[in-house]
Image (cartoon, rainbow, N blue to C red):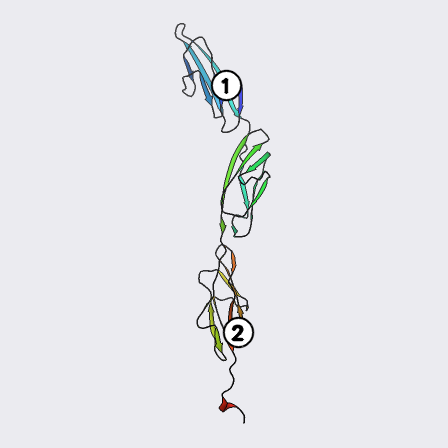
Amino acid sequence: DEVIMICKGDSAFVEARSAVDNYSWSDGVKSPGRYLTEPGRYIVSVYDRATCAESKDTIRVALKSTFEPRITSIPKTVCEGDSITLSVDGPINSWLWSNGDQTQSTFVKTSGKYTCVTLDSAGCTATSEITVTVNPRPRPTIQANRSLTICLDDVITLTAPPGFRKYEWNTGETGRSITTDQGGDYVVTAVDDNGCIGTSDTTRGCLLYTSPSPRDRTR
């Protein structure tokens, strides 16, 4: 049998020729010429009504390459500001990414769909795609239960928003809220469910040292 080699997704035009005009292909097509797009064995029959003679011919279609490129990502998801590495491995001669890169791997930092057109060693092109998700970093805020200016023997409670997996204050405490009687700068770092880390702006507490009243002074 004659063998026609095609790439996946391509087609080959074939045409049967005979003195009679009564064609029938094994898959039901009745015209002499046709496009073949799938691998397989195709038989064309020609029937001569005048002589009741039937002749057949066979052609086979095979794929030049069965390689199917696939984009892999390391890591699977990233946080805002980080990069993710996309790669296509295999018997490939050239790459063309949707961001313009022409290397085996590309580095991306934004969410969206990325495609890569590859040319393999058999001369076949294929397009693969992947959707990248870049998660925003948390932006925790600090809320105080009272004025940030406190006097001696007073305390203030500072609280971060709920919903984070982990909290860590610059004081070393790891709860959502902290209580302090000290002035100074306070910052909280939060980790969300995606593992992304964000740090709050600095909150400054002011401690007022009051002088003793006149009646408490030593004469």
Label 1 vs label 2, nearer the camera? 2
User: Which quadrant of the view contains residue 170?
Assistant: bottom right
Q: Quadrant of the C terminus?
A: bottom right
Closer to the camera in the image, 12 or 216: 216
Closer to the camera in the image, 34 or 82: 82
User: Which quadrant of the view contains residue 144?
Assistant: bottom left
Q: How many marks?
A: 2
| Residue at which label 2 appears | 183
Point 42% across, 14% down: residue:
23
Point 46% across, 18% down: residue:
43
Closer to the camera in the image, 148 or 122: 148
In this view, the residue farthest toward the top is 51
Residue 3 against residue 81 in the figure, above or below: above
Local secondary structure at mark 2:
loop
Point 56% across, 36% down: residue:
96
- Circle number at residue 24: none
Give the amino acid type for the residue marked by disc 2 in the picture: Gly
Residue 1, position as x, y percentages in the image: 53, 17
Local secondary structure at mark 1:
strand
| Residue at which label 1 appears | 59
